[in-house]
Image: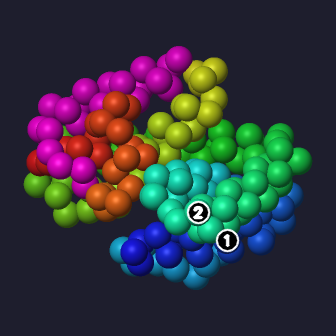
Amino acid sequence: MTFLKDDWDYLKNSAEVLENYLLSSQWMWPDPSGLNDNQRQVQLMPGNVLLSISRLEAYSWLPADYTRLKDLTATIDGIIDHWKHAWDHKMKTESNMRIRLWNEYISELIKDPKIGGKNYGFQVRTRVIIQLFFQLYTGEDPSEQARIAQMDMSLRSITRDGPFIWESEIQQGFPFNPYWYLYVKF
């Protein structure tokens, strides 16, 4: 369950610096937990916070651990609510960046689908975060949604259905619809 410990540590450490981050002019901060995910730092950004929360909430915790998680997410939610404008601004900036990065990654996959299996499990985090943003803000720009739909069609053209690619312990939190891209193989 190391992967959940990493998410837990990231979230706990993020909560400690979240207000300072939101009040800063920077739209991302160095990893607050000092962890590396596949040798890539996980920066403090709204999408990574939302993803860690989603991954942790997907797990079937014992009641005491679930209570600790709910307390931690309530703390984070309180900070976000208090600094909503700053959170929304950073999230919009990140959303634009994530869409651009996902588009670049999909373009690379189309050119050489063989690279997909090598780091797709990490790269698909970007697509999941975009989905989390869309779920939170249903008023997203329709042109952004159309761009994502086009990228999804491109990804579908080079993949086929497969098993859940992340840890099976969190699969229940990421159902096939809308997270079909977590159930592909190349």
Residue 63, labelled with which disc? Answer: 2
In the rendered image, which quarter is residue 84 located in?
top right
For the N terminus, the image quarter is: bottom left
> Does the magenta run of residues contain 156?
yes
> Does the magenta run of residues contain 78?
no
Residue drawn at the location 57% of the way across and 38% of the way down: 133
How many callouts does the rendering have?
A: 2
Residue 41: image x %, image y %? Answer: 50, 73
| SS type, badge 1 | helix
| SS type, badge 2 | helix
For the residue carrying disc 2, how many other residues have a C-alpha within 10 Å: few (<14), some (14-19), or many (20+)? few
Pointer 2 with pointer 1, Cβ within 8 A: no
Residue tagged 1:
12
Q: Is residue 126 visible?
A: no
Which segment did they paint magenta? 142-165
Of residue 103 and residue 137, the one placed in the foreground of this image is: 137
Amino acid type indicated by mark 1: Lys
Q: CA distance from mark 2 to mark 1?
A: 18 Å
Amino acid type indicated by mark 2: Pro
Residue drawn at the location 77% of the way across and 70% of the way down: 17
Residue 171: image x %, image y %? Answer: 34, 50
Residue drawn at the location 64% of the way across and 52% of the way down: 46
